[in-house]
Amino acid sequence: QKEVEQNSGPLSVPEGAIASLNCTYSDRGSQSFFWYRQYSGKSPELIMFIYSNGDKEDGRFTAQLNKASQYVSLLIRDSQPSDSATYLCAVSLNAGGTSYGKLTFGQGTILTVHP
Amino acid sequence: DGGITQSPKYLFRKEGQNVTLSCEQNLNHDAMYWYRQDPGQGLRLIYYSQIVNDFQKGDIAEGYSVSREKKESFPLTVTSAQKNPTAFYLCASSDSGGAIGNEQFFGPGTRLTVL
């Protein structure tokens, strides 16, 4: 079982729709969760991070965390063609300091927003 | 401008050669990381360093070496022992200011191709 799993997609949504990206993780000790966006040929850029159960909103983006279900998601409202990219979920483990700041990434979900 | 720089952007290596990838940051971040990304895959951690003159192996350290002589610099050497080095290499840094799972910021990457 992979430590961090995402549907590889591609996920295709029409412009203006809500895109829902999902991520599950295996280690119950995971403390913090990150969503990165990566355009083709470019490096990842941080969109959002979340530490506590529940929702966290930032503009058109909402991150949702459910630690009991070991599940984190990213919702993109009013999707735009410029949102077309690969979205990477990353999880940080905290194991006595030795994993401090270390991220484990999922394989990414390709999102395509069509006009 | 604060940020992370990587050089070169593209690198070609002959089999049997060692090559060194540069990573510099002026964000005053304590921690630095090296990842490898293969097509359609997430990021895999090669090495990371939380303080100067100290570094730890990540998940795929075999065939790679690093040094951390200065806070702002974390070069990666891909040795001839790395059997399949063709990949996109990403350097990242984070501020280890006391909280767990601090978000990481990425440089633009180096694309290495073995001829």
Image (cartoon, grey):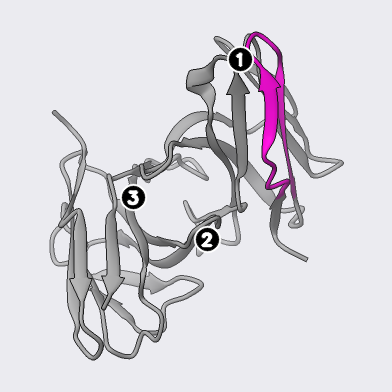
Residue A49 lies, in percent from the top left, at 55, 31
Residue B75 shows up from this direction: no
Q: Return the disc, 1 or 2, that comes first in the chain's sequence.
A: 1
Quadrant of the rendering where the N terminus of chain A is positioned: bottom right
Chain at numbered mark 2: A
Residue A102 inside the magenta-drawn segment:
no
Give a yes or no on whether discs 3 and 1 share a subunit: no
**Marks 1 and 2: CB-CB under 8 Å?**
no
Q: Quadrant of residue A112?
A: top right
As rendered, which of B85 and B2 lies closer to the eye?
A: B85
The amino acid type found where label 3 is placed reads Ala
Chain at numbered mark 3: B
Measured in 3D between alpha carbons, the distance from the residue under mark 1 to the one under mark 2, in whole angstroms, is: 35 Å
The amino acid type found where label 1 is placed reads Ser
Residue A54 lies, in percent from the top left, at 75, 23
* Residue drawn at point x = 36 percent, y = 76 percent: B85
The amino acid type found where label 2 is placed reads Ser
Residue B99 lies, in percent from the top left, at 48, 40
Q: Is residue A55 above or below residue A111?
A: above
Residue position for label 1: A79
Residue position for label 2: A99
Quadrant of the rendering where the C terminus of chain A is positioned: top right
Please tell me whether mark 1 or mark 2 is closer to you in this view. 1
Q: Is residue B68 above or below residue A55?
A: below
Measured in 3D between alpha carbons, the distance from the residue under mark 2 to the one under mark 3, in whole angstroms, is: 15 Å
Disc 3 secondary structure class: strand
Give a yes or no on whether discs 1 and 2 share a subunit: yes
* Left or right: residue A10 compared with residue B104: right
* Left or right: residue A17 compared with residue B14: right
Disc 1 secondary structure class: loop
Disc 2 secondary structure class: loop
